[in-house]
Amino acid sequence: MVGAVLYYLGHEGRYAFDRKFDYGFRFAAQSTLTTPEPLDQDPNATVVASSPDATQGPDDKEAGLMMPTIAELAGGAQVVTGASLTADPTKTDPEQLFRDDWRPSTTADVSESALIYVCATPEYKGQTMKLAWKPDVDFEPSSSPRKYILSQVSGPGYEEFKPVDLTRTAEGAIEIETYRANTDADRTKGYVFKLDIVPNMGQNAAVLTDFFSTRWLTGVTHVRYGVMPLLLSTLAMTVLAVLMAIPISFVTAGYIREFASDRVRGWLKPTIELLASIPTVVLGYFGLTLLGPKIQGLFGGILQMDNPRSLLTASVVLSFLLVPTITTLAEEALNNVPNSIRDAGDGLGLTRWEALRQIIFPAAKGGLIAAVMFGFARAIGETIIIWMLSGGTPHMPGVNLATLGGSTRGISDTIGIELGNVDFEGVHYGHLYLLGLTLFLLTLAFNSLGYKLARRAAWRQ
């Protein structure tokens, strides 16, 4: 059964390796006589980017946005950029210069080139101008599987221009000598810059590198499928929940086994086991309507909580889910301790509490650790509680109080939230199955460890 599940998750996860990688940069010519406006707001900036929706050749994003003519620029912008949809400057048609260059996304092992034309109008009086660049929104060149090299093809001083690696210098500007275009044909005779998109790794390596990165962004232009924020948040919520559940569970198990009368044990033990059958959605509503607002009221200022849905709230409610499981297994571990050990404690004159703490708990250590491991495995795959209470925002957890009070998201609820809104057998679909494979392997590892420890403890006893 384990082999079948692993095969199924891996088989469906293979679609992640069909991924095509996007990129995007904004370029703009700027005056050195005035303070330029931000590139994000420059109406004359040129976008060189790839997109899953783009097509080869002019499409709706480009055809309606031609590079302005000299007449259209009169009295307005004095330095402009444009793009040609051909990578060969000798084949560029001056009448077919577009404002932007959008092209289809490709796999990580494909090379591409794009041309950018820069000129000034006759009205511009400065002796120099600037070419500035910046990554498009949501695009991180340093996390891309490619290198982006900006070089000069022609224009004044191109022999002296050193290529710039935009992977390292993602945002910047260079000052260049002014070139004025007196006619529309002159726009292609001045500065020509080339952006080379060079593969830096193979396709499979690129997919896996991004999968183990630190950002999960799926509703943006340039998507990221990094599992680390989801994985670390899942582990953080699980560890906190287990740490909160252990004292309650161990004390309860110790009371049931060592202190409770037969009558009390007869109703308390089944009651605790019955708590394990409470639907998790009920616990989720309990946390959302009652416990969450209380936690925000008590710790909101310290933890900078602006919402009751947080990592701490999800962990606290998750601990309620674990108490029955850990208590039952811990009580069984204590029950397996031989009575001769208890008699030894009585012979030493220890109280029942001292015997429990100093002799019985250490003797049952293997079984208690196994109980914790099984509780850990139970918590790490929980979905509804995390979905309802974590906040739903995938952030990398930090070692600070703000992380406890902040919104987060785990692996299991990410699968639940996004699986219904993806294309069947698409790239996003494949990455969600890779998440499922990761979660299954974690659960399998903790269950196997707990089972091994439980068997070792039983053998010793």
Image: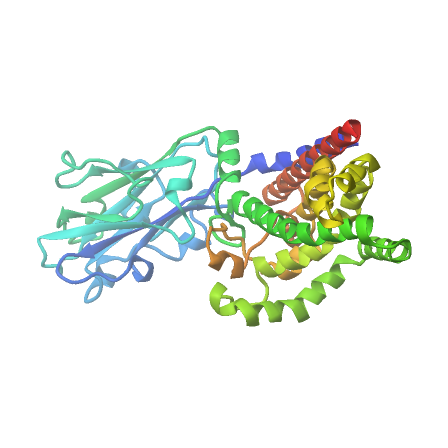
Q: How many marks?
A: 0
397 relative to 132 in the view: left or right:
right
226 relative to 58 in the view: left or right:
right
Residue at position x 35%, y 39% in the image: 86
- Is 206 rendered above or below residue 138? above
Q: Between residues 147 and 416, which one lies in front from this camera angle?
A: 416
317 relative to 142 in the view: left or right:
right
Residue 126, x across and y down, in percent: 10, 57
Residue 221, x across and y down, in percent: 47, 52
Residue 247, x across and y down, in percent: 67, 52
Q: Between residues 458 and 67, which one lies in front from this camera angle?
A: 458
Q: Between residues 387 and 380, which one lies in front from this camera angle?
A: 380
Q: How is the image coloured?
A: rainbow
In the rendered image, which quarter contains the N terminus? top right
Q: Between residues 187 and 451, which one lies in front from this camera angle?
A: 451
In the rendered image, which quarter contains the C terminus? top right
- Is 214 rendered above or below residue 320? above
Q: Quadrant of residue 201?
A: top left
Residue at position x 79%, y 27% in the image: 459
In this view of the protein, can residue 438 be seen by the observer?
A: yes
- Is 103 rendered above or below residue 445? below
- Is 64 rendered above or below residue 299? above
In this view of the protein, can residue 20 be seen by the observer?
A: no
Residue 71, x across and y down, in percent: 22, 61
